[in-house]
Every structure is written in C-alpha cells, then in structure tokens.
Image (cartoon, rainbow, N blue to C red):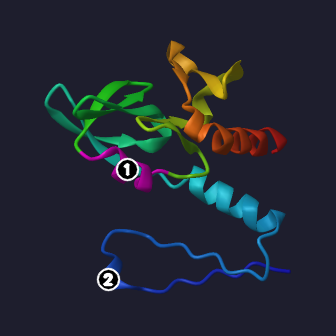
Amino acid sequence: MGVKFCFIQDDALGEDIEIIVRAADKDERVKKLLFVLSENSGQQISGQLLSENDHIKTSDIILVMRDGRYVTAKTVAGDYVVKDALTRVEESLDPAWFVRISQSEIINLKYLKNWDFVGGGVIQVKMENGIVSYTSRRYAKQIHETLKRRVRR
C-alpha cells in the first residue's frame, strides 16, 4: 500500500526526465499522482513573439490554434507564433489539460470559464481573456466526455 521511489541514471534521456508509474490498477491514488505530476511538469514549447524566440510554459497557454499557415499560442502574456505543426504541438501538451476542440484549435481546460451546448452538436467554449470558440461536431462527443469527467473531479 506504500509508494516507492527509485532513481535510475540514463544518459540516453539527455536533459529530459521520464517518470513511469507502475501499479496493479489505475485506482484513485494513481490518478491523483498522475494529475499532480502532469500539473507540475513545467512543460514548455518554443514560440516566437515579434521575431524574438521564447520558451512558453504550457501552463500559461490558454489556446493553441492554426491560423492560416501559422500556429498561434494565445497565452496570458500574449500571442506567440509556434514554429511547428499543430499535431506536433498537441503531442507535447498534457492530455489531462489540453483538449482538441476542432481541426484547428486546442484549449487548456485550466482557463475554461464556461461551456454551453448551442445546438447541432456544437459546444460554445468561453475561455479567460474573453476568448470564445466553437467546437466542431466531429470532436463534440469526445469533448463532452472530457468535460463531464472534469466536472466530477
């Protein structure tokens, strides 16, 4: 019933840290541990604001969207152009907090203020900083399930 910690040095990881949680079942204790680890991971993606390269903390990202040829990350500090494809950005984001709402947008549930079904299988999503987005019907069922799970926590 206890928790054991073990450090294994692996030069192949470079500067990355890999955390593996092993347990008999994915019970509430494991889910809470994974939640805390993912919340405090300090993940970063690279972005550019007015030609200056920056590292953006993923915890500051409100919304990531494909805007024409560019991917833009809207953060609490401003908008950044991300020099990567939206699918690659999505892979680097924590799925516990980041949800794809359409083919061109991913939101951070930490900044979700309100969501409402507006009909036709579309959900209106209101984020902090006055950002309003709409889900596509293609992702509506997946989003609905994710939001229901979040509300129960």
Q: Is residue 132 left or right of residue 153?
A: left
Left/right of residue 117 with respect to residue 104 in the rendered view = right
Whole-percent x and y of residue 127? 57, 22
Highlighted magenta segment, given as a residue range: 84-93
Q: What residue occupies the far top of the structure in this picture?
A: 130
Foreground residue among 44 and 149: 149
Amino acid type, residue under disc 2 in the picture: Ala
The residue that appears at 38% across and 32% down in the rendered structure is: 65
Q: Nearer the viewer, residue 59 or 24?
A: 24
Residue that numbered label 1 is attached to? 87
Where is residue 14? Give x, y as percent: 30, 74
**In the displayed structure, would residue 19 be above or below residue 126?**
below
Q: Which residue corresponds to mark 2?
A: 12
Residue at the extreme left of the image, as rendered: 51
SS class of the residue under badge 1? helix
Residue at the front extreme? 120
Where is 85 relative to 76, above or below?
below
Q: CA distance from mark 2 to mark 1?
A: 25 Å
Q: As shown in the figure, which amino acid type bears the numbered disc 1?
A: Thr
Count of marks overlaid on the render: 2
Neighbours of disc 1 within 10 Å: few (<14), some (14-19), many (20+): few
Residue at 56 percent of width and 39 percent of height: 138
The quarter of the displayed image where residue 37 is located? bottom right
Residue 113 or residue 57, whichever sits in front: 113
Which badge, 2 or 1, comes first in the chain's sequence? Answer: 2
